[in-house]
Image (cartoon, rainbow, N blue to C red):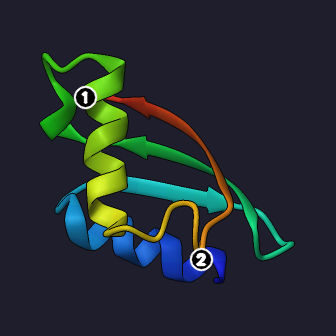
Amino acid sequence: MKKEEIQALIAAGLPGANVVVRGDDGQHFEADVVWAGFAGKSPVAQHQAVYAALGGRMGGEIHALQLKTRAA
């Protein structure tokens, strides 16, 4: 999977989010996600929202994703 695909999936699942994904080996990625919808949510809940946007690709098409999330 390409970083651009991951970025598009997260952006589609979290409308209005500012998403930057890095990683060029096709398996290991880093994502910075800033989204107003994270306001008042714990870091765990924020990460769960990102994983939900990826729709089950974690552990399969995406081997590893390091997340940095925060509310806008």
Q: Which mark is residue 61?
A: 2
Residue that numbered label 1 is attached to? 45
Position in image of residue 72 (x %, y %): 26, 32
Instruction: Characterize the local packing of mark 2: few (<14), some (14-19) or many (20 or more) Cα atoms within 10 angstroms.
Output: few
Position in image of residue 44 (x %, y %): 34, 24
N-terminal of the two: label 2 or label 1?
Answer: 1
Residue 12 seen in the current view:
yes
Position of residue 24 relative to residue 33, above or below, is: below
Instruction: Characterize the local packing of mark 1: few (<14), some (14-19) or many (20 or more) Cα atoms within 10 angstroms.
Output: few
Cα gap from disc 2 to disc 1, whole angstroms:
22 Å
State the quadrant of the N terminus. Answer: bottom right
Q: Which mark is residue 36?
A: none
Residue 8 horizontal side relative to residue 55, left or right: right
Position of residue 2 relative to residue 55, above or below, is: below
- Figure disc tally: 2
Taking the spot 63% from the left edge, 74% from the top edge, the residue there is: 3
